[in-house]
Amino acid sequence: MSIMQCTKEIYQKNGFFGLYKGWGISMMGIAPFIGIKMSSYDFLMGKFGVAKGDPRSVYYNLFLGAVAGTIAVTGTYPFDLVRRLL
């Protein structure tokens, strides 16, 4: 079944607003995720980051971004689980 077929079926069964079912819980989960990710990244860069001209800064950015993302996912996973179950 293609995306267009699924979209048509949802629209026929639930109307226009059926296409946005689960949007509220998605927004409730993404806002804290972004907040936690950005604040933990800033904290980690302040503690462990290197100067901007340092050639290793790319690797530090990559690693600390991955750690910040892991922290954020760990904290907001229950919202994502509820969203997927809806």
Image (cartoon, rainbow, N blue to C red):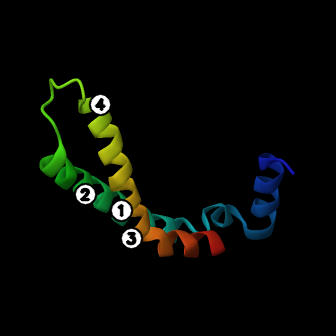
Asked whether disc 4 touches disc 3, contact meaning CB atoms under 8 Å apart, the reply is no
Please give the residue where the numbered disc 3 appears in the rendered image: 75
Residue at the image position 75 percent from the left and 60 percent from the top: 11
On the image, the x and y values in percent for residue 76 come to: 42, 69
Badge 3 or badge 2: first in the primary sequence: 2
Query: Gap between marks 4 and 3, in whole Å?
Result: 26 Å
Badge 4 or badge 2: first in the primary sequence: 2
Residue 51: in sight, yes or no? yes
Please give the residue where the numbered disc 4 appears in the rendered image: 58
Asked whether disc 1 touches disc 2, contact meaning CB atoms under 8 Å apart, the reply is yes
Please give the residue where the numbered disc 1 appears in the rendered image: 71
Asked whether disc 1 touches disc 3, contact meaning CB atoms under 8 Å apart, the reply is yes
Closest to the observer, 61 or 36: 61
Residue at the image position 30 percent from the left and 47 percent from the top: 64
Residue at the image position 74 percent from the left and 69 percent from the top: 14
Label 1: how many residues lie within 10 Å, few (<14), some (14-19) or many (20+)?
Answer: some
